[in-house]
Image (cartoon, rainbow, N blue to C red):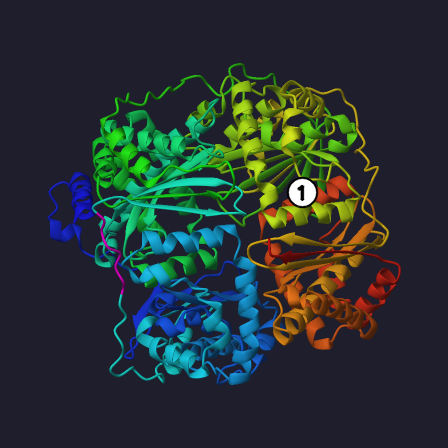
């Protein structure tokens, strides 16, 4: 096998004279994992992990999916996934969800599932396991999902409409294009006609027994894996699992689980798919190859394969990005990867993909083929490889340093993948050691041999997608085949890698000083006042060993500027980082930062200037240097900016073809009274922008650091941070001024408004949004109450609009209480069948009014209360949460943390009802709906 021979070359270079048999021995399983198989064939993975404390994840992975359906069952693998939440042997009806939600485990957020072609995975996540009974109940739920789903006729019928509406919501231009491509590129394979959503004719009409036949045939222990990770007693949990799951009988005369293959193709497969609502064009070239076997993936070969895939993709992606940022670039963006061939588990593909300007797909295809052929002919350079290797090893080093504080979900993902796809689970210590050993022993010659071995002249697939539109043409199959042949004979030059040895900062700044130090016991922070007027807030934590987060915020923002600057302000955040910093353009800057785990960006919002950054403790110096340059030395690169503007103008050409774009603008008009600052960016606004003016705004907003407050949260050593703050922050320019934020002269609409309109579309859908707005003084308690009501209505709408009516896949709810304007908003929105639109609109309003007038039910209220308390406990161990809390306090003087738990605990259904009655009695109602009609 081609891939195997490449891997063997790498292994020989890594381990010298070790015998091939020794190299191919399976890697040991991490001793921290209790891994085993029961007599009935069920596989299990159990691991104790205390991050987060008192939380656990419970998963069941089924090695079955839509690929195993027969023609009369299309869509039923996915339908069965839905039915798992609608009653089982030990949890009839909705009692399973009611039980979980009463313990703060929210449906849709913590309880969910997915179905693909080859697997179906269910999860119960972030479960509080401070009581033994909760662990027992979750094990029982997994047991029922394994072989005791009720599949009652009434529940099946009620779920048909929900799935039909899921199909409606998801059937956009991208999905229709995929449904056109799959049968072409997988011709001759079972993958060609087994999209997981299935056909709505079958979904709405299948006999009950057909679903039960699929369930009893394929949901069985020899195809199932149980994964439990969290703050549990692993020995005790293993014993309980065996007791519960050993009762499931081993299947007799079980049907063979076939892994359907994808045929090779000697001649290229060409597939072109268009859609009237598509907003962009894309060109993709696949070089198919056999995947590494599960047995080989479990050995050192699997580690070597991960290394090779990673560094080759990194190097080609850097080349493609460099091209895309040049003037008159052949494509708008491009990237590459080596993974599954689209949806198949039995065929991989080295893949290159690019976004095309309208009508230029042939030009894009040629550029992709040229760059791939350049790699095939000349390989990568030594300097490219060293950067890619440094970046990869930096990422794995960060994971290694965090090994004692990995969260449950990272282990779960690893074990689910091991069960469904094979590979190794030897633990981060072994992974880290082996990847470093592979990297140290693998030269550029082996890497180039690997990538060149993948780029062949057979097993090529080319897909082109884009809008179906008058005047937009696509290359014919004959033209594409000709181009594929011509590229092989085209004269190409090797890639030249330009690398600078300059330091990041050419002239080190003169340090300022810390003139005052105070502490805030409330947040456990130290505050430094600097000689230039800026402040620095430090919150050391032990939540992560290799993470430091930073923000810098100053009052001001977009609203300080007149309307004539709106086009410049709309693109400011996209443009300002394009030029690079200091003496380096964006491409060169990325090369200089190779091997460093650091990021920084600046931007504006309505009322503030903001800097966001992150790094590891090791790379803190680099973060501080980037911060200094972002304030003092933006690199001007007009060519990069013009290239970006050209791309965006082309992307915006077809945005209106997407019905949702039209709806978004209508909603913005409804909420913000045609405020031009709130409207989507238009192509003509791009022509009104001025790069020099944008740089002038940058200088005005960031040229004075005196009213900035910089906050650092994470694994911080104050002694190490102090000289860096003095050198790179206290030295920033300052006028010692204090600025007030801009004010919104328009604000949110405060009067009733209705807009119902029709829109031609391919998949007939009605979209409905309703918003209630009004005035309310901001306080933490008011914000908590409004948030609780939002979540209560989410439960109410799930039970009524989704489940009872079967009229939508889900109703989204959102609430906002503004700190700046003391205005509040509650919004609901959903998609539905146009025939049901009017009925569901009325019911959504009536259910809202009923909840306000009668008050939330005790049951729904308690579910939300438990979830909020659970989430708050989790948040207290997150650097990101503390950064947000401290920033809110610094910006508004509002403490959103102290007393949070007490406020939540003292709430009652009556207290929620009291505020909602007051708010909604004076609220304006804004309703916008779009009904799909035939063209």
The percent coordinates of residue 33 (x first, y second) are: 35, 63
Residue nearer the viewer, 251 or 30: 251
Identified at 32% across, 67% down, the residue is 35
Picture layout, residue 286 above or below residue 785? above
Identified at 59% across, 28% down, the residue is 575
The percent coordinates of residue 221 (x first, y second) are: 33, 76
Magenta span covers which residues? 259-265
Which corner quadrant of the image does residue 330 belong to? top left
Q: Is residue 392 left or right of residue 451?
A: right
The percent coordinates of residue 37 (x first, y second) are: 29, 73
Total number of numbered discs in the rendering: 1
Q: Is residue 739 left or right of residue 343?
A: right
Quick one: SS at disc 1? strand
Q: Is residue 705 left or right of residue 108?
A: right
Identified at 24% across, 82% down, the residue is 253
Residue 686 seen: yes
Picture layout, residue 769 above or below residue 12? below
Residue 128 seen: no
Residue nearer the viewer, 892 or 603: 603
Q: Residue furthest top?
A: 507
Mark 1 Cα shell of 10 Å, populated few (<14), some (14-19), many (≥20): some
Which corner quadrant of the image does residue 454 belong to? top left
Picture layout, residue 769 above or below residue 104? above
Q: Which residue is mark 1?
A: 525
The percent coordinates of residue 11 (x first, y second) are: 18, 43
> Magenta-highlighted stretch: main secondary structure?
loop
Q: Is residue 823 magenta?
A: no
């Amino acid at each position: 096998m081609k891939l195997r021979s490449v891997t063997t070359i790498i292994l020989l270079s890594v381990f010298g004279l070790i015998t091939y048999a020794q190299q191919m021995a399976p890697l040991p399983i991490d001793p921290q994992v209790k891994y085993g198989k029961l007599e009935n064939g069920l596989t299990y993975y159990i691991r104790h992990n205390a991050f987060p404390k008192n939380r656990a994840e419970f998963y069941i992975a089924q090695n079955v999916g839509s690929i195993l359906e027969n023609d009369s069952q299309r869509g039923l693998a996915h339908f069965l996934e839905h039915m798992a939440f609608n009653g089982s042997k030990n949890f009839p009806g909705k009692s399973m969800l009611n039980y979980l939600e009463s313990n703060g485990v929210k449906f849709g957020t913590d309880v969910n599932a997915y179905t693909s072609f080859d697997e179906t995975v269910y999860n119960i996540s972030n479960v509080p396991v401070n009581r033994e009974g909760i662990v027992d109940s979750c094990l029982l739920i997994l047991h029922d999902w394994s072989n005791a789903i009720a599949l009652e006729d009434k529940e099946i019928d009620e779920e048909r409409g929900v799935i039909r509406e899921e199909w409606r919501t998801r059937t956009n231009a991208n999905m229709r294009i995929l449904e056109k491509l799959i049968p072409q590129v997988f011709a001759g394979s079972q993958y060609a006609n087994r999209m997981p959503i299935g056909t709505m004719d079958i979904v709405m009409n299948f006999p009950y027994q057909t679903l039960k036949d699929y369930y009893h045939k394929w949901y069985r222990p020899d195809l199932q894996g149980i994964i439990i990770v969290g703050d549990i007693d692993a020995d005790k949990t293993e014993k309980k699992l065996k007791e519960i799951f050993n009762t499931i009988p081993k299947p007799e005369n079980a049907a063979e689980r076939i892994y359907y293959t994808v045929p090779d193709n000697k001649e290229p497969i060409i597939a072109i798919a268009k859609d009237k609502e598509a907003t962009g064009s894309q060109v993709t070239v696949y070089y198919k190859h056999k995947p590494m076997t599960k047995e080989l993936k479990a050995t050192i070969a699997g580690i070597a394969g991960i290394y090779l895939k990673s560094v080759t993709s990194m190097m080609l992606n850097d080349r493609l990005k460099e091209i895309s940022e040049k003037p008159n670039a052949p494509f708008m963006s491009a990237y590459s990867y080596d993974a599954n061939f689209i949806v198949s588990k039995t065929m991989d593909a080295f893949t290159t993909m690019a976004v095309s300007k309208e009508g230029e797909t042939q030009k894009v295809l040629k550029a992709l083929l040229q760059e791939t052929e350049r790699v095939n002919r000349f390989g990568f350079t030594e300097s490219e490889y060293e950067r890619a290797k440094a970046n990869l090893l930096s990422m794995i080093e960060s994971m290694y340093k965090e090994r004692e504080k990995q969260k449950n979900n990272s282990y779960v993902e690893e074990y689910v993948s091991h069960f469904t796809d094979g590979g190794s689970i030897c633990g981060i210590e072994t992974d880290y050691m082996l990847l470093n050993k592979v990297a140290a022993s693998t030269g550029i010659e082996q890497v180039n041999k690997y990538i060149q071995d993948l780029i062949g002249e057979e097993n090529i697939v080319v897909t082109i997608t884009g809008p179906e539109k008058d005047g937009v043409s696509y290359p014919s199959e004959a033209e594409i085949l000709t181009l594929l042949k011509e590229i092989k004979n085209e004269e190409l030059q090797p890639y030249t890698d330009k690398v600078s040895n300059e330091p990041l900062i050419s002239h080190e700044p003169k340090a300022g000083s810390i003139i005052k130090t105070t502490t805030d016991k409330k947040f456990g922070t130290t505050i430094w006042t600097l000689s230039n007027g800026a402040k620095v807030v430090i919150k050391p934590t032990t939540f992560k060993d290799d993470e430091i987060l930073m923000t810098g915020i100053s009052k001001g923002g977009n609203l300080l500027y007149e309307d004539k600057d709106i086009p410049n302000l709309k693109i400011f955040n996209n443009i300002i980082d394009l030029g690079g910093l200091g003496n380096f353009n964006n491409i060169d800057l990325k090369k200089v930062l190779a091997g460093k785990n650091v990021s920084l960006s600046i931007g504006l919002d309505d009322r503030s200037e903001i800097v966001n950054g992150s790094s590891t403790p090791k790379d803190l110096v680099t973060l501080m240097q980037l911060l200094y340059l972002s304030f003092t030395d933006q690199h001007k690169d007009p060519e990069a900016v013009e290239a970006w503007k050209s791309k965006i103008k082309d992307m915006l050409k077809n945005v209106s073809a997407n019905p949702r774009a039209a709806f978004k603008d209508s909603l913005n008009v409804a909420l913000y009274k045609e405020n031009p600052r709130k409207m989507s960016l238009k192509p003509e606004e791009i022509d009104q922008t001025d790069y020099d003016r944008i740089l002038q705004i940058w200088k005005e907003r960031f040229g004075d650091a005196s009213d900035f407050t910089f906050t650092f949260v994470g694994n911080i050593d104050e002694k190490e941070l102090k000289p860096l703050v003095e050198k790179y922050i206290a030295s920033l320019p300052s006028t010692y001024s204090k600025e007030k934020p801009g004010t919104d002269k328009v604000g949110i609409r405060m009067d009733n408004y209705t807009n119902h309109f029709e829109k031609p579309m391919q998949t007939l859908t009605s979209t409905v949004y309703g918003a209630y707005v009004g005035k309310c003084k901001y306080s933490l308690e008011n914000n908590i109450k409004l948030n609780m009501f939002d979540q209560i209505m989410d439960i109410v709408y799930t039970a009524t609009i989704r489940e009872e009516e079967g009229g939508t896949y889900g109703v989204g709810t959102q609430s906002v209480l503004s700190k700046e304007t003391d205005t509040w908003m509650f919004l609901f929105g959903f998609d539905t069948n146009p025939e049901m639109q009017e009925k569901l609109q009325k019911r959504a309003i009536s259910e809202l009014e009923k909840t306000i007038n009668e008050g939330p039910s005790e049951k729904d209220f308690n579910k939300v209360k438990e979830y909020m308390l659970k989430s708050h406990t989790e948040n207290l161990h997150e650097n990101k949460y503390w950064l947000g809390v401290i920033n809110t306090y610094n910006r508004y003087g509002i403490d959103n943390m102290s007393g949070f738990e007490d406020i939540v605990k003292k709430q009652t259904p009556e207290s929620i009802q009291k505020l909602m009655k007051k708010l909604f009695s004076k609220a304006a109602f804004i309703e916008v709906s779009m009904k799909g009609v035939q063209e």
